[in-house]
Image (cartoon, coloured by chain):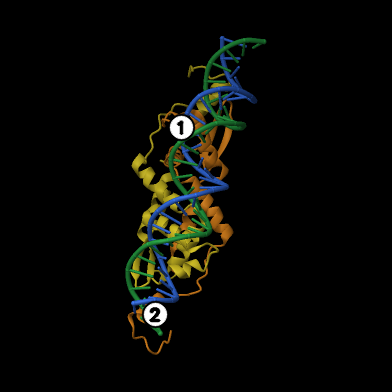
Chain colours: A orange, B yellow, C green, D blue
DNA sequence: TATCTATATAGACGATTATCTATGCAATGG
DNA sequence: CCATTGCATAGATAATCGTCTATATAGATA
């Protein structure tokens, strides 16, 4: 492309597009994978509502409280809680027969902040 | 459970747990589904890095700029862009042979805000 | 000790996802 | 008008996910 003679529509488009910018991602592949794991855990409506329930009475919520809120079997609820736990979005402590669940607000804060930097202009 | 005689460990645990809270999600099922759709689109490292690239030069990025950044075939890149477009995270306008991509920062702002209310204590 | 209760695990199975190759299409340029 | 280029679509296939039933485990209670 000759910058001194931008005449055809294609050349004008080419200038507007600035093709081959050689852009660089500000996010490393490792960072992106970690973020993606968290977003995958958040990508199910039941798990989002679970987080909502748990956060309302953080540390005072057990599985049966959650279970009665959905029309799902107990193993399925247990599975969703495990997905949240495995990526660090909640922590779970056994208390006798029950298990207490807490939201990891620090992690969610970090996600929110990363989300902001992700799409901010350079 | 008799509230007047909390003696055994089980009863103490039961009190601590406050089982059967009858919690209510502050998020409707429809809201949760919409949120989950967006998080699902964000749940792939390539799509996260794509958003990062596009946002750096919003409206001046075409598919080939993105393509050269990954070791993936063109149809796969096209697929990921479609996933982002279908849930409203980017918009795409044809410019001659190219297609310009823009990040929908309004939507991402809304997601960030919803994320905050999602896990804030009541 | 036997039983109940809250939870976890294993395995099955259908649905969805990520990737590829092959192909189509529309705009550009010679 | 033909070749090229950027992008989309179709179809195949392997991997992952969401849900279930069945079963195991561990603490509590009688």
Quadrant including the N terminus of chain A:
bottom left
- Name the chain letter of the residue that bears numbered label 2: A
Q: Which corner quadrant of the image does residue B108 belong to?
A: bottom left
Viewer can see residue B28 = no
Count of marks overlaid on the render: 2
Tell me the crowding category of disc 1: few under 14, some 14 to 19, or many 20 or more residues within 10 angstroms, Cα based: many
Q: Position of residue C13 (x, y in %)?
A: 50, 33
**Which residue is more in the foreground, C27 or B112?**
C27
Asked if residue A90 is positioned above or below residue B68 in the image, the reply reads: above
Quick check: B53 left or right of A9? right
Vertical placement of residue D10 versus B23, above or below: below
In the picture, residue A99 is in which quadrant?
top right
- Give the CA separation, mark 1 to mark 2: 56 Å
Secondary structure of residue under mark 1:
helix
The x and y percentages for residue A42 are 47, 46
Residue at the image point whose x is 41% and y is 87% from the top: A3
Q: Nearer the viewer, residue A4 or B51?
A: A4
Residue that label 2 marks = A15
| Residue in the picture at 36% in, 79% down | A10
Does mark 2 fall on the same chain as mark 1?
yes
Residue that badge 1 annotates: A66
**In the image, farthest residue toward the bottom:** A4
Q: Position of residue B94 (x, y in %)?
A: 34, 68
Residue B68 visible in the current orientation: yes
Q: Looking at the image, is mark 1 or mark 2 nearer the viewer?
A: 2
Residue A25 placement (x, y as % from top left): 52, 66
Depth check, front residue: D26 or D21: D21
Residue name at image x 41 percent, y 55 percent: B83
Q: Residues within 10 Å of mark 2 (few under 14, many from 20)?
A: some
């Amino acid at each position: 492309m000759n910058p001194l003679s931008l005449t055809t529509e294609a050349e004008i488009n080419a200038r507007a597009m600035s093709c081959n910018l050689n852009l660089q991602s500000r996010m490393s592949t490792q960072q992106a994978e970690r973020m993606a794991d968290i977003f995958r855990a958040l990508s199910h409506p039941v798990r989002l509502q679970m987080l909502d329930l748990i956060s309302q009475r953080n540390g005072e919520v057990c599985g049966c409280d959650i279970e009665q809120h959905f029309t799902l079997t107990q193993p399925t609820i247990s599975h969703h809680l495990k997905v949240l736990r495995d990526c660090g979005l909640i922590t779970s402590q056994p208390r006798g027969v029950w298990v207490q669940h807490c939201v990891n607000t620090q992690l969610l804060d970090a996600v929110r902040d990363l989300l902001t930097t992700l799409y901010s202009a350079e």
